Amino acid sequence: MIHLVKQTTLIRPAGNVTPGRRRLADLQYVYTLTAFVSLGGFLFGWDQGVMAMIIADERWLKLMQPVSDWSVGFVVSIYNIGCVIGAMTTGFFADVCGRERTISLASTVFIIGALLQAASYTITQISIGRFILGLGVGAYSAGVPLYISEISPAELRGRIVGIELMILCFGEMVVFWIVYAFYFLNSDDWWRIPLVIQVIPAIILAIGCWTWVPPSPRWLVAEERYECALEVLSRLHGSDAAELEIGEIRKTVSEEQVTTQASWSDMFKGPVLRVTLLGTSIQMFQQTTGTNGIFYYAPSLFKKGGITDPTMANLATGGIGVVLFLSSWIPIFYFDRFGRKTWLQFGLIGMISALVGICVLQQHAADYPHSPANNAIIIFPYMFFTFFNMSWSSGSWTYAAEIFPISLRAKGNALCTASLWISNFVVAQVSPPIETATGYGLYILFAIICVFAFFFVRYALVETRGRSLEDMAELFGIDGSKESQDLQDSSAAFTALLAATLAEGHYIFSQLIVNGKAVGQDYTYIRKNSNTYMPSFPSEVINSPDLRCNKGAQAGSTQTYSVNAGDKIGFKLAYNEFIEHPGPGFVYMSKAPESGVASYDGSGDWFKVYEIGLCNPSTPGNDGSWCSWQKDRIEFTIPKEIPAGEYLVRVEHIGLHEAFKDRAQFYMECAQLKIASDGTGTPSPLAKIPGIYKADDPGIKFDKWNSPKANSYVMPGPAIWQP
């Protein structure tokens, strides 16, 4: 089932991209992707603001008949419980299905919840709809920042995550005025319209993330789809930056490969616990410092501040949306100019001042209920959200999304987002009764929490500005820790099983092609093997007989196909795959003894008849420079000078993407051919297999990631027979 959901299509350069050509960074593409997936943020913002005026409207209250302030709070807060669950499950789905497909699935759930709440007639019905809607929004809140942070250049990550927050605030602003406009309809059902309108962008987001948005390059690396990851990075950041970044990503993922299998409990062990506490705490403070306590119940705040006309209170509430949107542009242009800690502390100072102002003005309204000065209450919520938006609104999301090492990022981001939603639930549930009981005491409580948050930021947070996502493990002291070693030991068996499973996805040359046409079926004329074998370098590559035709390759039911000298022979990959590993390809032949090829084990002499290497030797580190890149087969022509007889014909492709770690990958198969020929040539040079490669062979130990020099690649193995 998961295979049907995750993106498995090959990601290749567009038709207008010249193979081997260096591409420049395309920030417009980065910003376009950010803006599109941030429709999830827009819907997040929409549902943050859509209920504020609705739950204060007499027509809605008459229909729903809530029994108390707690019932009204439950309608608002049950949505947050759904968000907690949605955020927590995002970690699993984002790792397994991919970031963009998770957002698409979240949109489907969102649509169901939106339609249910729009069709409700009771508190119970609307609460169920709000809960289901929350599942989708929770997944948005965790999945969208995760995806955006993984496609963003390190130096622009704060700005780009800020764009998502700006679009979120745009949603909050738009929904305020949409609700305000429909508020004047002469209908008891006016509130259903803004609840159902949001289905339209959700449908667009679901389709776009399924069909157009590319997977995260870091997710592709974790899936061992390295060439697809390189292509996505090249589109985003340009060829030069992509090759450097993918090297860093692959190195980090390789070092953390075992911890990728970390359980939820591993998030609370050793140095990882510190990162988890920082991320969950910053998201908790983002909510408990007052933002949604003010936001959800703004009409009530203005009413107790002396603005008693419901229309004016709603109009002032709509102004909050405008302030949120306008102030959200500040971090886009300035957030990355200063440290994360600087912004967060600066924001808290302004937020505390605004909360004090709210308390003073509400007390003034209580003492002088008809004073024109009461209108000044409007200033302080606007001030609060200006300071909040330029700091905590984007800062907490950016920090929580970036501090976890790659292997822990999806689970860490889910935990942090769940912390935010749990805090949101508590604030939404307790704010109405606390305000009823204490008045402006609620805002005094928020101010006290802001003071605690200030000291937390100043003395507990670690500055991350300008650090790449690959630096985070080192920054927080996770690399090489005892905990990592313990986890490695406990996960060794799982890793071995995983490696065997992944090996099944390696290249399999299963179909024989003769003069451009497929003959027989898979393995009709090619010896079937285990399809899981990857010879280790250097031991098995140098010494193992399995290097001849692959492990487990026996003649069995394999048939021998008759061809003529001069025919063009091809070996096509199974499953309509393409070669997407950089590296050379070879064809070797070995004449069978008189007993025939069906009983021949390949222990005789071999000679090379074909090799395919670099089409552009000046850039050997570029995948597109390899002639076999994105081909579905390796083809050669049988030399006319070859003597007649039965032959084992061995095709081989060497993947060099992990050669820098002595982990070059060898994919080989053997076909059985009977060749009719008048040739009398003497093939040479002759070699045994194993024996064609050496431990220090530069063509196998080649490092494509370290900017290799032009014309530096040397083809491994013996020379080609030149009749």
Image: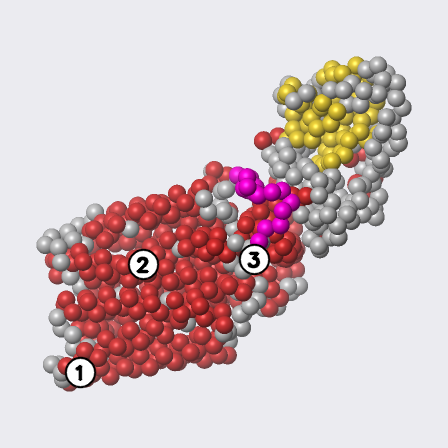
Q: How far apart are marks 1 and 3 (CA)?
A: 53 Å
* The C terminus sits in image quarter: top right
Marks 1 and 3 in Cβ contact (< 8 Å): no
Mark with earlier residue (3, 2): 2
Residues 587 and 266: in front is 587
Mark with earlier residue (1, 2): 2
* Amino acid of disc 2: Gly
Task: Kindly indicate the quadrant of the structure image that contains residue 363.
Answer: bottom left
Q: In the visual, does 324 lie left or right of 222?
A: left
Q: Name the residue under label 3.
A: 406
Res. 694 visible in picture: yes
Q: Name the residue under label 1.
A: 373
Q: What stretch is highlighted in magenta?
A: 9-24
Q: Residue shown at 44%/53% (left/top)? A: 32
Q: Residues within 10 Å of mark 3 (few under 14, many from 20)?
A: many
Please tell me the numbered disc located at residue 171.
2
* Amino acid of disc 1: Ala
